[in-house]
Image: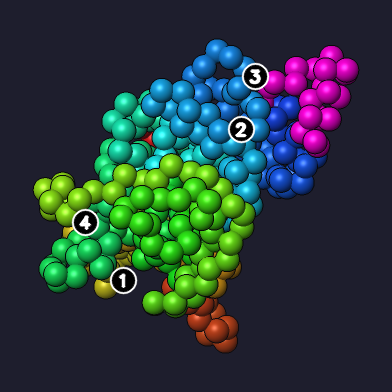
Protein backbone atom coordinates (compact mmCIF):
# COMPACT_ATOMS: atom_id res chain seq x y z
CA UNK A 1 0.00 0.00 0.00
CA UNK A 2 2.82 2.40 0.88
CA UNK A 3 4.51 1.89 -2.49
CA UNK A 4 1.21 2.46 -4.33
CA UNK A 5 0.57 5.72 -2.45
CA UNK A 6 4.08 6.95 -3.21
CA UNK A 7 3.61 6.20 -6.90
CA UNK A 8 0.30 8.14 -6.89
CA UNK A 9 2.01 11.11 -5.23
CA UNK A 10 4.68 11.05 -7.93
CA UNK A 11 2.02 11.19 -10.63
CA UNK A 12 0.27 14.12 -8.93
CA UNK A 13 3.45 16.19 -8.53
CA UNK A 14 4.45 15.58 -12.14
CA UNK A 15 7.55 13.46 -11.50
CA UNK A 16 8.18 10.13 -13.17
CA UNK A 17 6.96 7.38 -10.78
CA UNK A 18 9.01 4.85 -12.75
CA UNK A 19 12.50 6.26 -12.33
CA UNK A 20 15.49 5.15 -10.34
CA UNK A 21 15.25 8.20 -8.10
CA UNK A 22 11.60 7.54 -7.24
CA UNK A 23 12.36 3.86 -6.65
CA UNK A 24 14.94 4.88 -4.04
CA UNK A 25 12.51 7.42 -2.56
CA UNK A 26 9.88 4.70 -2.17
CA UNK A 27 12.36 2.41 -0.45
CA UNK A 28 13.24 5.17 2.01
CA UNK A 29 9.59 6.10 2.59
CA UNK A 30 8.76 2.46 3.33
CA UNK A 31 11.61 2.27 5.83
CA UNK A 32 13.43 -0.34 3.73
CA UNK A 33 16.51 1.78 3.05
CA UNK A 34 18.41 4.09 5.38
CA UNK A 35 19.64 7.51 4.22
CA UNK A 36 23.25 6.35 4.73
CA UNK A 37 22.94 3.77 1.95
CA UNK A 38 20.43 5.51 -0.32
CA UNK A 39 23.09 7.47 -2.19
CA UNK A 40 24.68 4.28 -3.56
CA UNK A 41 21.27 3.09 -4.85
CA UNK A 42 20.77 6.50 -6.47
CA UNK A 43 24.11 6.30 -8.28
CA UNK A 44 23.48 2.80 -9.68
CA UNK A 45 20.57 3.01 -12.12
CA UNK A 46 18.69 -0.28 -11.92
CA UNK A 47 17.34 0.11 -15.45
CA UNK A 48 20.85 0.03 -16.92
CA UNK A 49 21.44 -3.41 -15.39
CA UNK A 50 18.06 -4.76 -16.54
CA UNK A 51 18.61 -3.72 -20.13
CA UNK A 52 14.89 -3.51 -20.94
CA UNK A 53 13.25 -0.45 -22.45
CA UNK A 54 10.09 -0.84 -20.34
CA UNK A 55 10.80 1.51 -17.43
CA UNK A 56 7.79 0.50 -15.31
CA UNK A 57 9.13 -3.01 -14.76
CA UNK A 58 12.69 -1.74 -14.29
CA UNK A 59 11.88 0.31 -11.19
CA UNK A 60 8.85 -1.48 -9.71
CA UNK A 61 9.34 -3.31 -6.44
CA UNK A 62 9.29 -6.71 -8.05
CA UNK A 63 11.82 -9.27 -9.28
CA UNK A 64 12.73 -9.26 -12.96
CA UNK A 65 13.45 -12.27 -15.10
CA UNK A 66 14.18 -11.21 -18.65
CA UNK A 67 15.89 -13.95 -20.60
CA UNK A 68 19.21 -14.59 -18.87
CA UNK A 69 18.95 -11.45 -16.72
CA UNK A 70 17.57 -12.05 -13.22
CA UNK A 71 17.27 -9.29 -10.60
CA UNK A 72 15.62 -9.45 -7.21
CA UNK A 73 13.06 -6.86 -6.10
CA UNK A 74 14.65 -3.55 -4.99
CA UNK A 75 13.31 -4.08 -1.45
CA UNK A 76 15.19 -7.40 -1.23
CA UNK A 77 18.46 -5.70 -2.20
CA UNK A 78 17.73 -2.97 0.34
CA UNK A 79 17.11 -5.56 3.06
CA UNK A 80 20.29 -7.39 2.08
CA UNK A 81 22.59 -4.36 2.13
CA UNK A 82 21.13 -3.19 5.45
CA UNK A 83 21.63 -6.64 6.99
CA UNK A 84 25.17 -6.89 5.64
CA UNK A 85 26.14 -3.64 7.35
CA UNK A 86 28.71 -2.76 4.68
CA UNK A 87 31.26 -0.18 5.77
CA UNK A 88 34.12 1.51 3.87
CA UNK A 89 36.97 -0.96 3.49
CA UNK A 90 34.92 -4.14 3.77
CA UNK A 91 35.94 -6.90 1.37
CA UNK A 92 32.94 -8.33 -0.48
CA UNK A 93 32.01 -11.48 -2.40
CA UNK A 94 28.81 -11.77 -4.45
CA UNK A 95 27.86 -15.33 -5.37
CA UNK A 96 25.59 -15.23 -8.41
CA UNK A 97 26.53 -11.68 -9.36
CA UNK A 98 24.48 -11.53 -12.58
CA UNK A 99 24.79 -8.18 -14.35
CA UNK A 100 26.67 -6.66 -11.41
CA UNK A 101 23.89 -4.40 -10.11
CA UNK A 102 24.18 -5.25 -6.41
CA UNK A 103 27.97 -5.61 -6.60
CA UNK A 104 28.18 -2.05 -7.92
CA UNK A 105 26.05 -0.72 -5.07
CA UNK A 106 28.25 -2.43 -2.48
CA UNK A 107 31.40 -1.23 -4.29
CA UNK A 108 30.30 2.39 -3.88
CA UNK A 109 29.64 1.88 -0.16
CA UNK A 110 32.84 -0.08 0.58
CA UNK A 111 35.03 2.19 -1.53
CA UNK A 112 37.86 1.47 -3.99
CA UNK A 113 40.57 0.44 -1.50
CA UNK A 114 39.38 -3.08 -0.81
CA UNK A 115 38.37 -6.30 -2.58
CA UNK A 116 35.07 -6.74 -4.44
CA UNK A 117 34.57 -10.04 -6.28
CA UNK A 118 31.58 -11.45 -8.16
CA UNK A 119 31.18 -15.07 -9.27
CA UNK A 120 28.66 -15.92 -11.99
CA UNK A 121 28.15 -19.16 -13.97
CA UNK A 122 26.71 -17.40 -17.05
CA UNK A 123 29.57 -16.24 -19.27
CA UNK A 124 27.43 -13.66 -21.10
CA UNK A 125 26.43 -12.01 -17.82
CA UNK A 126 30.05 -11.93 -16.64
CA UNK A 127 31.01 -10.12 -19.83
CA UNK A 128 28.08 -7.71 -19.47
CA UNK A 129 28.81 -7.01 -15.79
CA UNK A 130 32.48 -6.35 -16.54
CA UNK A 131 31.57 -3.95 -19.34
CA UNK A 132 29.05 -2.03 -17.20
CA UNK A 133 31.56 -1.73 -14.36
CA UNK A 134 34.22 -0.41 -16.75
CA UNK A 135 31.77 2.10 -18.22
CA UNK A 136 30.96 3.44 -14.75
CA UNK A 137 34.57 4.28 -13.99
CA UNK A 138 33.96 4.63 -10.22
CA UNK A 139 34.29 0.97 -9.22
CA UNK A 140 37.90 0.17 -10.24
CA UNK A 141 38.25 -2.74 -7.82
CA UNK A 142 35.16 -4.61 -9.03
CA UNK A 143 36.09 -7.94 -10.67
CA UNK A 144 33.81 -10.68 -12.02
CA UNK A 145 34.71 -14.34 -12.55
CA UNK A 146 33.06 -16.94 -14.76
CA UNK A 147 32.56 -20.08 -12.68
CA UNK A 148 30.08 -22.08 -10.69
CA UNK A 149 30.31 -21.05 -7.05
CA UNK A 150 31.06 -24.66 -6.09
CA UNK A 151 34.38 -24.29 -7.91
CA UNK A 152 35.53 -21.90 -5.18
CA UNK A 153 38.29 -23.70 -3.34
CA UNK A 154 37.71 -23.27 0.39
CA UNK A 155 39.87 -24.68 3.17
CA UNK A 156 37.45 -27.62 3.49
CA UNK A 157 37.55 -28.34 -0.24
CA UNK A 158 41.35 -28.34 -0.20
CA UNK A 159 41.66 -30.50 2.92
CA UNK A 160 42.91 -33.46 0.89
CA UNK A 161 45.93 -31.50 -0.29
CA UNK A 162 47.93 -29.60 2.31
CA UNK A 163 49.69 -27.59 -0.43
CA UNK A 164 46.56 -26.51 -2.29
CA UNK A 165 45.93 -22.79 -2.49
CA UNK A 166 42.58 -21.63 -1.13
CA UNK A 167 40.34 -18.61 -1.58
CA UNK A 168 40.69 -15.54 0.57
CA UNK A 169 38.08 -14.87 3.25
CA UNK A 170 35.70 -11.92 3.09
CA UNK A 171 34.15 -9.40 5.46
CA UNK A 172 30.81 -9.53 3.67
CA UNK A 173 29.18 -12.10 1.36
CA UNK A 174 25.86 -12.02 -0.49
CA UNK A 175 24.39 -15.19 -2.02
CA UNK A 176 21.75 -14.51 -4.67
CA UNK A 177 20.37 -18.04 -5.04
CA UNK A 178 19.16 -20.73 -2.66
CA UNK A 179 22.18 -22.57 -1.28
CA UNK A 180 22.57 -25.77 0.70
CA UNK A 181 22.74 -25.47 4.49
CA UNK A 182 26.03 -23.86 5.67
CA UNK A 183 27.28 -23.57 2.09
CA UNK A 184 29.87 -20.76 1.73
CA UNK A 185 30.01 -20.03 5.48
CA UNK A 186 33.70 -20.97 5.45
CA UNK A 187 34.52 -18.02 3.17
CA UNK A 188 33.76 -15.54 5.95
CA UNK A 189 36.42 -13.86 8.04
CA UNK A 190 35.89 -13.88 11.80
CA UNK A 191 33.27 -11.24 12.48
CA UNK A 192 32.17 -11.39 8.84
CA UNK A 193 28.53 -11.38 7.74
CA UNK A 194 26.81 -13.44 5.04
CA UNK A 195 23.28 -12.78 3.78
CA UNK A 196 21.44 -15.10 1.43
CA UNK A 197 18.41 -17.36 0.90
CA UNK A 198 18.64 -20.76 2.57
CA UNK A 199 16.30 -23.71 2.95
CA UNK A 200 14.93 -24.83 6.27
CA UNK A 201 16.21 -28.37 6.36
CA UNK A 202 17.50 -30.52 3.53
CA UNK A 203 15.87 -30.43 0.07
CA UNK A 204 13.85 -33.54 -0.82
CA UNK A 205 15.70 -35.50 -3.51
CA UNK A 206 17.52 -32.35 -4.55
CA UNK A 207 14.32 -30.30 -4.96
CA UNK A 208 13.77 -27.04 -3.13
CA UNK A 209 10.49 -25.87 -1.63
CA UNK A 210 9.82 -22.15 -2.00
CA UNK A 211 7.61 -22.10 1.11
CA UNK A 212 10.61 -23.06 3.25
CA UNK A 213 12.99 -20.36 2.04
CA UNK A 214 14.22 -17.55 4.27
CA UNK A 215 16.65 -14.71 3.76
CA UNK A 216 19.22 -15.50 6.44
CA UNK A 217 21.92 -13.45 8.13
CA UNK A 218 25.00 -15.39 9.27
CA UNK A 219 27.80 -14.04 11.46
CA UNK A 220 31.06 -15.92 11.93
CA UNK A 221 31.94 -15.78 15.63
CA UNK A 222 34.82 -18.26 15.71
CA UNK A 223 36.80 -20.80 13.67
CA UNK A 224 33.80 -23.14 13.45
CA UNK A 225 31.13 -21.05 15.13
CA UNK A 226 28.32 -19.16 13.42
CA UNK A 227 25.17 -17.40 14.57
CA UNK A 228 22.16 -17.38 12.24
CA UNK A 229 19.05 -15.23 12.20
CA UNK A 230 16.09 -15.18 9.81
CA UNK A 231 15.28 -11.90 8.10
CA UNK A 232 12.21 -12.67 6.00
CA UNK A 233 10.54 -15.33 3.87
CA UNK A 234 11.65 -15.20 0.24
CA UNK A 235 11.31 -17.04 -3.05
CA UNK A 236 14.62 -17.46 -4.90
CA UNK A 237 15.75 -19.80 -7.64
CA UNK A 238 18.36 -22.29 -6.42
CA UNK A 239 22.03 -22.05 -7.24
CA UNK A 240 23.12 -24.63 -9.76
CA UNK A 241 24.60 -27.52 -7.80
CA UNK A 242 27.25 -29.50 -9.66
CA UNK A 243 27.23 -33.28 -9.55
CA UNK A 244 30.32 -34.85 -8.01
CA UNK A 245 31.68 -35.90 -11.39
CA UNK A 246 31.15 -32.39 -12.81
CA UNK A 247 32.83 -30.88 -9.78
CA UNK A 248 35.86 -33.16 -10.12
CA UNK A 249 36.31 -32.16 -13.76
CA UNK A 250 35.76 -28.43 -13.23
CA UNK A 251 38.89 -26.36 -12.51
CA UNK A 252 39.13 -24.95 -9.00
CA UNK A 253 38.63 -21.20 -8.61
CA UNK A 254 40.96 -19.53 -6.12
CA UNK A 255 40.08 -15.88 -5.55
CA UNK A 256 42.83 -13.65 -4.24
CA UNK A 257 43.18 -9.91 -3.71
CA UNK A 258 45.60 -7.77 -5.71
CA UNK A 259 49.31 -8.48 -5.50
CA UNK A 260 51.33 -5.34 -4.88
CA UNK A 261 53.32 -3.67 -7.63
CA UNK A 262 54.16 -0.02 -8.36
CA UNK A 263 51.42 0.04 -11.02
CA UNK A 264 48.60 -0.88 -8.59
CA UNK A 265 50.02 0.80 -5.47
CA UNK A 266 47.27 3.44 -5.44
CA UNK A 267 44.57 0.76 -5.10
CA UNK A 268 45.89 -0.60 -1.77
CA UNK A 269 44.69 0.38 1.72
CA UNK A 270 46.38 3.51 3.05
CA UNK A 271 48.12 1.63 5.88
CA UNK A 272 49.66 -0.71 3.29
CA UNK A 273 50.83 2.23 1.16
CA UNK A 274 52.29 4.00 4.22
CA UNK A 275 54.23 0.86 5.16
CA UNK A 276 55.61 0.53 1.62
CA UNK A 277 56.73 4.15 1.74
CA UNK A 278 58.47 3.56 5.06
CA UNK A 279 60.27 0.41 3.90
CA UNK A 280 61.45 2.01 0.67
CA UNK A 281 62.60 5.08 2.54
CA UNK A 282 64.53 3.01 5.09
CA UNK A 283 66.15 1.01 2.30
CA UNK A 284 67.70 4.24 1.03
CA UNK A 285 69.42 4.97 4.35
CA UNK A 286 72.94 3.50 4.45
CA UNK A 287 72.84 3.23 8.26
CA UNK A 288 69.75 1.02 8.01
CA UNK A 289 70.23 -2.75 7.66
CA UNK A 290 67.42 -2.81 5.11
CA UNK A 291 69.70 -0.95 2.65
CA UNK A 292 71.77 -4.16 2.33
CA UNK A 293 68.82 -5.84 0.64
CA UNK A 294 68.82 -5.35 -3.16
CA UNK A 295 65.91 -3.19 -4.29
CA UNK A 296 64.52 -5.85 -6.64
CA UNK A 297 64.41 -8.35 -3.77
CA UNK A 298 62.55 -5.85 -1.57
CA UNK A 299 60.01 -5.21 -4.33
CA UNK A 300 59.56 -8.94 -4.76
CA UNK A 301 58.88 -9.32 -1.03
CA UNK A 302 56.31 -6.53 -1.17
CA UNK A 303 54.68 -8.27 -4.13
CA UNK A 304 54.18 -11.42 -2.02
CA UNK A 305 52.59 -9.62 0.94
CA UNK A 306 48.82 -10.19 1.37
CA UNK A 307 46.51 -7.30 0.52
CA UNK A 308 45.43 -6.97 4.18
CA UNK A 309 48.90 -7.73 5.59
CA UNK A 310 49.03 -4.65 7.81
CA UNK A 311 45.36 -4.56 8.78
CA UNK A 312 44.28 -4.96 12.41
CA UNK A 313 42.47 -8.18 13.26
CA UNK A 314 38.76 -7.71 12.48
CA UNK A 315 36.44 -7.54 15.47
CA UNK A 316 33.18 -9.39 15.77
CA UNK A 317 30.71 -7.66 13.45
CA UNK A 318 32.90 -4.63 13.87
CA UNK A 319 35.02 -2.52 11.66
CA UNK A 320 36.41 -3.73 8.34
CA UNK A 321 39.83 -5.24 7.96
CA UNK A 322 41.48 -1.83 7.81
CA UNK A 323 38.99 0.44 9.57
CA UNK A 324 40.26 3.95 9.99
CA UNK A 325 42.95 3.36 7.39
CA UNK A 326 40.79 3.69 4.28
CA UNK A 327 41.19 6.85 2.23
CA UNK A 328 39.81 7.64 -1.18
CA UNK A 329 42.25 7.89 -4.03
CA UNK A 330 41.35 11.53 -4.45
CA UNK A 331 42.38 12.33 -0.86
CA UNK A 332 45.71 10.52 -0.96
CA UNK A 333 48.91 12.50 -1.65
CA UNK A 334 49.07 13.12 -5.37
CA UNK A 335 45.49 12.00 -5.91
CA UNK A 336 44.97 8.78 -7.90
CA UNK A 337 48.69 8.23 -8.42
CA UNK A 338 51.16 5.43 -7.79
CA UNK A 339 53.35 6.52 -4.87
CA UNK A 340 56.22 4.14 -4.87
CA UNK A 341 59.66 5.70 -5.56
CA UNK A 342 61.21 6.92 -2.32
CA UNK A 343 62.55 10.50 -2.38
CA UNK A 344 66.27 10.36 -1.73
CA UNK A 345 66.41 13.62 0.19
CA UNK A 346 63.76 12.65 2.74
CA UNK A 347 64.55 10.69 5.90
CA UNK A 348 62.23 9.14 8.45
CA UNK A 349 61.77 11.27 11.60
CA UNK A 350 63.63 10.08 14.66
CA UNK A 351 62.45 10.24 18.25
CA UNK A 352 64.38 12.16 20.90
CA UNK A 353 66.33 10.42 23.62
CA UNK A 354 63.67 11.28 26.18
CA UNK A 355 60.66 10.52 24.02
CA UNK A 356 59.27 7.03 23.70
CA UNK A 357 60.21 5.32 20.43
CA UNK A 358 57.16 5.05 18.10
CA UNK A 359 56.26 1.66 16.69
CA UNK A 360 57.22 0.99 13.09
CA UNK A 361 53.55 0.86 12.11
CA UNK A 362 52.82 4.22 13.77
CA UNK A 363 55.88 5.62 12.03
CA UNK A 364 54.59 4.32 8.74
CA UNK A 365 51.27 6.04 9.31
CA UNK A 366 53.02 9.30 10.15
CA UNK A 367 54.76 9.21 6.79
CA UNK A 368 51.49 8.85 4.91
CA UNK A 369 50.87 12.61 5.02
CA UNK A 370 54.40 13.53 3.88
CA UNK A 371 55.71 13.69 0.35
CA UNK A 372 58.13 10.81 0.75
CA UNK A 373 57.66 9.55 -2.78
CA UNK A 374 58.03 10.72 -6.33
CA UNK A 375 54.58 10.63 -7.91
CA UNK A 376 54.06 8.92 -11.23
CA UNK A 377 50.72 8.70 -13.07
CA UNK A 378 48.92 5.44 -12.56
CA UNK A 379 48.23 3.50 -15.77
Instruction: Sort mark 3 into few (<14), some (14-19) or many (20+) by Cα contacts within 10 Å.
Output: some
Q: Look at the image and say whether residue 272 sits in the magenta stretch.
A: no
32 horizontally vs 109: left or right: right
Q: Residue at x 41, y 23 (%)?
A: 67
Residue 223: image location, x then y, percent: 39, 77
Can residue 268 be seen at all in this image of the molecule?
Answer: no
Point out the residue furthest to the bottom here: 354
SS of the residue under disc 2: loop
Q: Which residue is mark 3?
A: 56
SS of the residue under disc 1: loop
Relative to 60, does residue 52 appear above or below in the rendering?
above
Relative to 117, does residue 8 appear above or below in the rendering?
above
Relative to 252, does residue 379 appear above or below in the rendering?
above
SS of the residue under disc 3: helix
The label shown at residue 288 is 1
Q: Which residues are magenta?
A: 1-20
Are dots 1 and 4 in contact, CB under 8 Å? no
Q: CA distance from mark 3 to mark 2?
A: 10 Å
Amino acid sequence: MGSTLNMLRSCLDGSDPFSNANMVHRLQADGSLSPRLANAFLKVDRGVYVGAEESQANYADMPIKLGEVHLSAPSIYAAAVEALGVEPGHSFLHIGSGTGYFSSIVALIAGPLTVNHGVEHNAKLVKLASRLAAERGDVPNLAFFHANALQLRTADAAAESSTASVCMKYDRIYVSGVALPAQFFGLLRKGGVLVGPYEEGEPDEGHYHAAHQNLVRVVRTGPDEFTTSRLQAVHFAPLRQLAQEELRQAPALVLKPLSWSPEVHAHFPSVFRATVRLLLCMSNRKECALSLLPRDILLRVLHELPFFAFAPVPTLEGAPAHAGQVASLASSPGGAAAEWACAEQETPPTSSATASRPSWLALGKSLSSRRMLAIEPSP
